[in-house]
Amino acid sequence: MVVAKSWTMVRHFEGAPKLEDFKLIENELPSLKDGELLLESEFLSVDPYMRPYSKLRLKDGDVMMGSQVARVIESKNPDFPVGGYFVAYAGWTTHFISDGKGLRALPSNWPENLPKSLALGVLGMPGMTAYIGLLEICKPKHGEVVLVNCAAGAVGSVVGQIAKIKGCKAVGSAGSDDKIAYLKEIGFDEAFNYKTVSSLEEALKQASPEGYDCYFENVGGTYADTALQQMKNFGRIAVCGAISMYNDSVPQTGPFIQPYLLFKQLRMEGFLVSSWEDKPQHQEGQKQLLEWVVEGKLKYHEHVTNGFENMPAGFIGMLKGENIGKAVIKV
Amino acid sequence: MVVAKSWTMVRHFEGAPKLEDFKLIENELPSLKDGELLLESEFLSVDPYMRPYSKLRLKDGDVMMGSQVARVIESKNPDFPVGGYFVAYAGWTTHFISDGKGLRALPSNWPENLPKSLALGVLGMPGMTAYIGLLEICKPKHGEVVLVNCAAGAVGSVVGQIAKIKGCKAVGSAGSDDKIAYLKEIGFDEAFNYKTVSSLEEALKQASPEGYDCYFENVGGTYADTALQQMKNFGRIAVCGAISMYNDSVPQTGPFIQPYLLFKQLRMEGFLVSSWEDKPQHQEGQKQLLEWVVEGKLKYHEHVTNGFENMPAGFIGMLKGENIGKAVIKV
């Protein structure tokens, strides 16, 4: 008999999520039926999308949404033998029963020396978000200038590195000097701390006086308003996130952006990587990311919070930007 | 010796252009040199773009920008014999000398019974703007729902009709009941007067309860804010104009749109038809529009202001939305 611990969202977040918005519950799991398997989470992911999507998808008291790398610890399904590792979307829980649907196996050529947690980061959803958003939405050409914000995060750090691999100039902004040092270490051409520069506009101009061809958008709000004005003609903006706006109960306002789009002929597109999962680009991307990581062309960093009991704190810290690279919870 | 009359912009417009912002001047034109030709404007175009672009491109006292259908009345260039008709971008002027560069001949298969002024409207820049913006930016599929505002204008009226030709549902809004009657006459499935509906949101929902796949944007501002919320997932927005914002000295503000783009995976793109002039789609479009007009599939209406002396009034009236279809000045 296995007891699953899970974190529920007690009530919908108002403003920034707080520790008291979460509650740890325990559930005794039933015995497996034929075709079922029992999995144990080893690493769980905390990601910015959970803030807006909990509002759209969850009701008060539901287990928080999310994914994990989990190991099969008992199985009545011959397709999923004990010991296998899978990425699942089972929410914030230590153990769960599955019929195998929706489980994604780690690639068969996964190198022994790579942490399996990378399947939640550079080799998982965030890495693929960077890959698809940059290459399929922004479509940068060799020699172009790519801007990414939240650049030291799980997605942004991959965006900048892929930009470099593709022969672009990578400019990133982040919110601490440690993060800026990290960005320079992993090859960004220009990086600045948006919290300490005297003017975002000036910082953007200094980093690329000619402007920007591609803008990988994770922040939204007034940052975006300033950045959009620095785009070159025919620039492309991939809207991946809007983390500065997720905690708003009243939407932030600013100048309407139609004139920016119109007079510079910009293309701005929102995307969700999940919509690309069945497309060939996604499969190619997964192969490519693993290859780049193995070759050392794509570096990664993980910000690990130890202990399932600390998962809400890890989530809250990630939303505040405490992490460099991918924030994960090690059970 | 020919005297050219021209309208200058005395000073940059503040708010809505006023009659006193324009001044009529006269210039004696010199004799032609070899290779030159003298043209006389028969029809001149007034278009919304002149409001924002005069700010970007002109200085106080310059002749207003714009295009005309003009006839060669004297020629020292064998490639441009007397009597030929051309579309030129010579500004608001009755006569001008050209070396032939930049003149665009009317198509050789132009039917005798079609007014040559259509080369400034449905068969000119506005028609091509509708064609490119709808088919190349929005890319509607058969059965999809297309929204266009300023729908009774030179561009919008063509957008809705092409949408119908392509098997879409066409929804249009405009600012008078006469315009709405016109929209129904030319085949829009749904049309409403945005000035008299009690709620734009409700009117949009009623016209298409399922939402919109394509949105051809001419207005911007709060209209756009409401319309963007009615888009379906994977909707496409062609930003062609933002007429509600052109007279602002302080930019209008509203909610940032990143969340709309992100959660519905919308694509929003500003475009200028002039950037398409060298592309094969432009040539195809010009052939196609003429064919549709000749076949009666594409209807047009012109709002003609008589007299070059009334051109500023015609421009001001067009910006106020007094026209149904294309506003032109007949010299």
Image (cartoon, coloured by chain):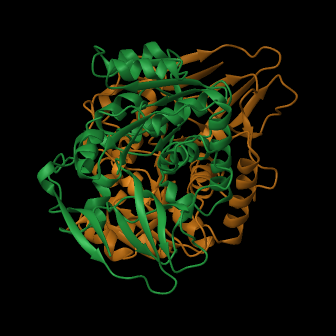
Chain colours: A orange, B green
Residue A35 appears left or right of A240: right
Q: Quadrant of the N terminus of chain A?
A: top right
Residue A284, percent from left and from top: 75, 54
The residue closer to the viewer here, B208 or A103, is B208
Place residue A29 in its image quadrant: top right
Measuring from the top left, give residue B212's x and y in whole percent: 52, 26
Q: Residue A232 at what x, y percent from top left?
A: 43, 66
Residue occupying the far right of the picture: A78
Which residue, as the protein is rendered here, is positioned at the far bottom? Answer: B34
Task: Please say if B62 is above or below B218.
Answer: below
Q: Give the x, y percent position of residue A250.
A: 25, 31
Residue at the image point whose x is 53% and y is 23% from the top: B186
Q: Residue at x 28, y 41 (%)?
A: B319
Q: Give the residue displayed 54% in from the left and 18% down from the top.
A: B189
Q: Is residue A283 left or right of residue B229?
A: right
- Front residue (pair A205, B211): B211
Q: Quadrant of the C terminus of chain A?
A: top right
Does residue A274 appear anywhere in the picture? Answer: yes
